[in-house]
Amino acid sequence: MLTGEIRSQIDRIWDAFWSGGISNPLEVLEQITYLLFLRRLDDLHTLEENKSARLKKPMERRIFPAGADPRGRPYDDLRWSRFKHLEAKEMFTVVSEHVFPFLRTLGGDGSTYAHHMKDARFTIPTPALLAKVVDMLEQVPMEDRDTKGDLYEYMLGKIASAGQNGQFRTPRHIIQLMVELTAPTPRDVICDPACGTAGFLVAAGEYLRERHPEIFRDPALKKHFHEQAFHGFDFDNTMLRIGSMNMLLHGVENPAIAYRDSLAQDHAGEEESYTLVLANPPFAGSLDYENCAKDLLQIVKTKKTELLFLALFLRLLKPGGRAAVIVPDGVLFGSSKAHKTIRQKLVEEQKLEAVISLPGGVFKPYAGVSTAILLFTKTNSGGTDHVWFYDVDADGWSLDDKRTPLLPEEKLGPVPAAPLTAEEHAKNNLPDLLARWHSLRETPNAKSQTPKMKPRSAVAIAAEAPTPYGGETTRPRTAQSFCVPKADIAAQGYDLSLNRYKEVVHEEVAHRPPGEILKALEKLETEIQQGMKELGGMLK
């Protein structure tokens, strides 16, 4: 866990960057990321040294070579454990003139992050600021995976501006919800084709660590976890570096995070390669047909990025693969031919399982757009019997720009540490949503290829929840969740918006007859006139 002291140190460093002239939060994070990587390289080199000393054999893999660099500085001076003790001015010279050229040419430890270092730039403006950042990072216990993961999450939370391509940070509790809904398994191959800071991949990794500790006792599963389970694409090099480091600090050694324009490049090598897709793709704007991958246009002919991404997910998934993806509401009810085509494909050719409507303020302060989570399984042979709808009214945080928590920390998120009362459920619907989803999976007539979760506190949540579980398929359409048969969806032109199917019960309000109201008004008028006469008499 992050202590208040570490948080305040990070805040001070952030302020120092701003006053030092670096106002772009992404650049601040990138510079800190480089330094974290340097510290990791030094730790790995020290491990190799210790191993060599114990075995009395030469070092198998030297990260920092013997001898000196082209400028005559010993490579040993480029190690974190050496330059951190230098005076600020000399430290600045070593890092800017020796360490960074070394990183660009050698790429360090062979990890995914190292591959994205070739265009690394050192932009910390002053020796004093560099010394301050190094001192702060030195105090973070890097051997504790949770602490360094939380540190990076805290810094990511400071990137409070949407990107130019419409990307913005998905709230952590929404990511966690989507991971819980899809329940990744140790053999899953997980992909996020618009990975950004790799939030979905990190959350999936944390889920697997918590629910499937057997991974780390089985060499084959452990190798799969570190090298084959996680795949992310992005076409922003800064994001690739930040995403790779985020995975590294959360204990995934070599995730496949690669430069790729997911919508523009053909997907011959990636087609049907993944068993689980988790994504919140950027849905701003449109592309020219010339810039779109031809294999996506064969699925749906459109320029809209949100529809092209849905086509991409279908392309990337293996048959039997699952997806949980965020889409803007327009995808659910858009009336263009492309909108209807992609919805029809999901319902008729694949197995569309759920549409979860999120409240409008979930992505504030970045965007006020209304969104939904789509859950589907790729079958290429249909399988949709009914679609489950859930209307999320509250996610545990206020829906204004401040997004302040409405409940104590132990009662937030989809799997809170403490059960919720009916009153608290009204402020956080996510545990109820998850419990109803599990109830639906266990219903005999709701078959699915999604693996079942291990029993967890969601069972306890269900016991405390304000509504009875079981029989999800028979709930009335006035309820917060309900199922709609495929035939009804087809009859509505494959409209998937919740409001199309939700029934609203209007309370009957009894009004008095107009004549009675007029008589009451006349009586009041008479009393007023009488009172005025009496007052007039007193004044005479």
Image: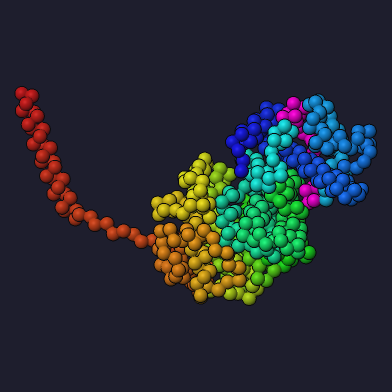
Check residue 114 for magenta coloring: yes
Q: Position of residue 174 (x, y in %)?
A: 57, 53
Describe the colour scheme in one phrase. Answer: rainbow
Relative to 44, residue 229 above or below? below
Near-viewer residue (256 or 8): 8
Residue 494 lies in what quarter of the image?
bottom right
Check residue 333 for magenta coloring: no
Instruction: Name which residue lies at 69% across and 40% down.
Output: 141
Q: Is residue 109 visible?
A: yes
Q: Position of residue 272 (x, y in %)?
A: 72, 67
Q: In the rendered view, does 336 fall on the left or right side of 52?
A: left
Give the quarter of the figure containing the N terminus.
Answer: top right
Near-viewer residue (441 or 512): 441
Q: Is residue 281 visible?
A: no
Relative to 502, residue 107 above or below? above
Q: Position of residue 540 (x, y in %)?
A: 5, 23
Q: Position of residue 216 (x, y in %)?
A: 71, 59
Q: Which residues are magenta?
A: 111-132
Q: In the rendered view, does 8 fall on the left or right side of 37?
A: left
Instruction: Name which residue lies at 60% across and 38% down.
Output: 3
Near-viewer residue (534 or 154): 154
Near-viewer residue (243 or 422): 422
Instruction: Name which residue lies at 55% across and 67% down.
Output: 353
Q: In the rendered view, does 455 fall on the left or right side of 482?
A: right
Residue sitting farthest toward the top: 540
Instruction: Name which residue lies at 57% across and 61% down.
Output: 181
